[in-house]
Amino acid sequence: MAGSSLPDRPGSWQVCAGCDRELPSSAADARCPDCGGLLEVRHRPPVQDGAKLRELFLSRRGRTGRLDASGVWKYRELVLPEAGADDVVTHPEGNTPLLSRASVSRFAGVESLHLKHEGHNPTGSFKDRGMTVGMTQARRVGARAVACASTGNTSASLAAYAANAGLPALVFVPSGQVALGKLAQTLAYGAKTLLVRGDFDECFALVRQASEKLNVYLLNSVNPFRIEGQKTIVFEALEQLLFDPPDWIALPAGNLGNTSAFGKALKEARELGLIPRLPRLACIQAAGANPFARAFREGFVRPHRVKAETVATAIKIGDPASLDRGIAAVRLTHGVVTDVTDEEILEAKAVVDASGVGCEPASAASVAGVRKLAAQGVIRQGDRVVAVLTGHILKDPGLLLDYHREREPAPARANRPIEIEPTLSAVEAVLSRQSP
């Protein structure tokens, strides 16, 4: 391979997606020192074939050992086989449910719809899966401190895992644009939190400069070890389906770290013989933050950048850092990218919430996107679909608790509290009312 400096490859190493230069796994830069391209972690293939790997992963279900108890590190042969048990920073994380709700399936227009709820992770979002591996790597390379830019979920996760690892944490968030639930987590876990007078993209540019000049370890999704952890969302969903892959996996798309991770996971799963075929990815953006969808509609001939505006704050990103890797994932899986309006997102969220599942607004984009693609005939009625819910309902409760907006909310979202007199007759009057 061009530029190879690793003739005797260890268990893991890094490769530049731009120029193919190989670097040791201990290299701390998120980008190639030669061309600036994003790096990807590669692993020596496990000795087991696909059937043996399936048996191995299934055998670890329910085990209480420190690594087996994690829904990330139970797949350690495919995540970071070099890491020793003493290196690993784990809560544990993962082991999130795969749910089915008839009301959500009817709304989406797809009979076989499963919800992979990543809001059940320790800090309430999928970010914990990437952070356990990223923080483990930070400790392995001797980082003095860790840092990220965030719309909220990454900062909460980084703060928690940095506290676990005993590392100082620095987070950059756009001032006034982060949901209070996420900001409260970040502060509670002890991270130094910088409120930047700008949007996420400006925060990310600043944290990259800080990483390069101040020698702190960058833990945004451009970090290739974060991607390794996020792959396990796919591995776990496939295991829950007994490695019978669905036709589609739908996910919200913001900075495209998850899109990249899903593509990498599916490629590896097929190559290792875990699955016989690839599901298609359906990447869903908010219409007000849709650079990836715009590029897809033009055949990915050029990148787009937008001024992001959406109620789905977790995907409120106008210039995705992992664009090239996201494009590769869509092409690999013959996937699609679409966008949905804030109204469509909130309508889907109301249905998910009312089913007793609940999710933050950005998560509901996946369900709204499935509904749109099913209506267009892209997703067929008989297709099996997994929609990923990326965050917990309490991550962004402001929309649920804002009862005094200038415009009346849509009826599906108008579950307002009812003020009554302290009498039994008042309670009876409420019970007698017809449900909408």
Image (cartoon, rainbow, N blue to C red):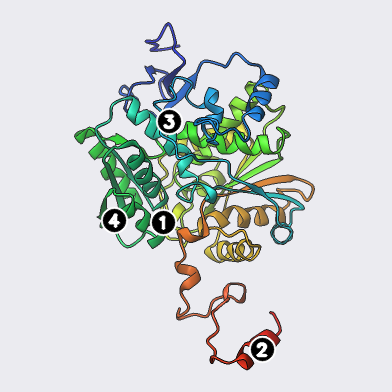
**Residue drawn 54% across the image and 80% down it:** 417
Q: Tag 1: Cα neighbours inside 10 Å, few (<14), some, or many (≥20)?
A: many
- Which residue in the structure is indicated by mark 1? 308
State which quadrant residue 179 falls in: bottom left
The three-letter amino acid code for the residue at tag 1 is: Ala
Tell me which label, 3 or 1, sits earlier in the chain.
3
Q: Tag 3: Cα neighbours inside 10 Å, few (<14), some, or many (≥20)?
A: many
Compared with 140, 117 (above or below) is: below
Compared with 176, 306 (above or below) is: above
**Residue drawn 71% across the image and 40% down it:** 247
Left of 418 or right of it: where is 32? left
The three-letter amino acid code for the residue at tag 3 is: Phe
- Toward the viewer: 47 or 332? 47
Q: Real-space Cα distance between discs 3 and 2?
A: 57 Å
Numbered disc in front, either 2 or 4 = 2
Compared with 399, 361 (above or below) is: above
Numbered disc in front, either 3 or 1 = 3
- Which residue in the structure is indicated by mark 3? 225
Mark 4: which secondary structure? loop
- Which residue in the structure is indicated by mark 4? 198
Tell me which label, 2 or 1, sits earlier in the chain.
1
Tell me which label, 4 or 1, sits earlier in the chain.
4
Numbered disc in front, either 2 or 1 = 2
- Which residue in the structure is indicated by mark 2? 428
The x, y position of residue 305, in whole percent, is: 40, 48
